[in-house]
Image: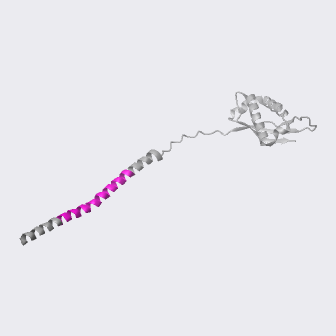
């Protein structure tokens, strides 16, 4: 009986060793499975992140249309204008001397302006004679003068238009 008991204990030890061996094998595979699951999760998250970046963050630059060649403006000199300013009750006469240049959109307009230059000069003279010295004070006064001269030139040239009236010289004396 002692021998039978010893054999039983030996079988139990063999079975226990086998169970311990299986547990050891399972323990060895558990981290491997865990690593594979973690790597798989990272791959999935990386794919989702790349997809989100492409969808939300990454914008393809649209092709830029070819920039059309911009024609440089053409400048047309207007003869110098000398007028006496309106003096409201003052016994001192003041004069205004203005040299201006017209900024034109294209060269062809110079041929159309030349024949009607007397009309342009007339509109300048009649407007400038009505100005008072106080109308020309400061940059705001000069800006208003420039805008008014541009408006009057465009009326005289209608249906054509100038881009701007540019001052070369302004003297109030």
Seen from the viewer's position, the closer of residues 145 and 105 is 145
Can the viewer see residue 77?
no
Occupied quadrant, residue 9:
bottom left
In the image, residue 75 lies in the stretch drawn in magenta: no
Extreme residue toward the right, this view: 91
Seen from the viewer's position, the closer of residues 110 and 86 is 86
Occupied quadrant, residue 148:
top right
Residue at image location 43% in from the left, 47% down from the top: 52
Looking at the image, residue 28 lies above or below residue 47: below
Q: Is residue 51 rendered to the left or right of residue 84? A: left
Extreme residue toward the front, this view: 1
Q: Position of residue 119 (x, y in %)?
A: 79, 28
Extreme residue toward the bottom, this view: 2
In the image, residue 24 lies in the stretch drawn in magenta: yes
Q: Is residue 49 rendered to the left or right of residue 81? A: left
Can the viewer see residue 135?
yes
Occupied quadrant, residue 123:
top right
Color theme of the render: one colour
Which region shows up in magenta?
17-45
Looking at the image, residue 160 lies above or below residue 169: above
Q: Position of residue 166 (x, y in %)?
A: 75, 39
The C terminus lies in which quarter of the figure?
Answer: top right
Extreme residue toward the left, this view: 1
The N terminus lies in which quarter of the figure?
Answer: bottom left
Q: Position of residue 46 (x, y in %)?
A: 39, 52
């Amino acid at each position: 009986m002692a021998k039978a008991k010893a054999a039983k204990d030996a079988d139990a030890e063999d079975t226990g060793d086998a169970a311990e061996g299986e547990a050891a094998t399972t323990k060895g595979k558990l981290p491997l499975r865990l690593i594979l699951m973690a790597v798989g999760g990272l791959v999935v998250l990386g794919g989702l992140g790349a997809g989100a970046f492409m969808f939300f963050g990454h914008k393809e630059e649209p092709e830029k249309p070819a920039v059309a060649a911009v024609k440089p403006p053409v400048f047309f000199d207007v003869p110098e204008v000398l007028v006496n300013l309106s003096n409201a009750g003052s016994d001192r006469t003041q004069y205004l001397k203005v040299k201006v240049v017209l900024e034109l959109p294209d060269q062809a307009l110079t041929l159309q302006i030349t024949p009607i230059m007397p009309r342009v000069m007339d509109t300048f003279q009649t407007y400038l004679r009505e100005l008072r010295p106080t109308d020309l004070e400061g940059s705001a006064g000069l800006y208003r003068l420039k805008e008014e001269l541009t408006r009057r030139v465009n009326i005289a040239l209608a249906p054509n238009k100038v881009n701007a009236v540019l001052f070369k010289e302004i003297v109030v004396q």
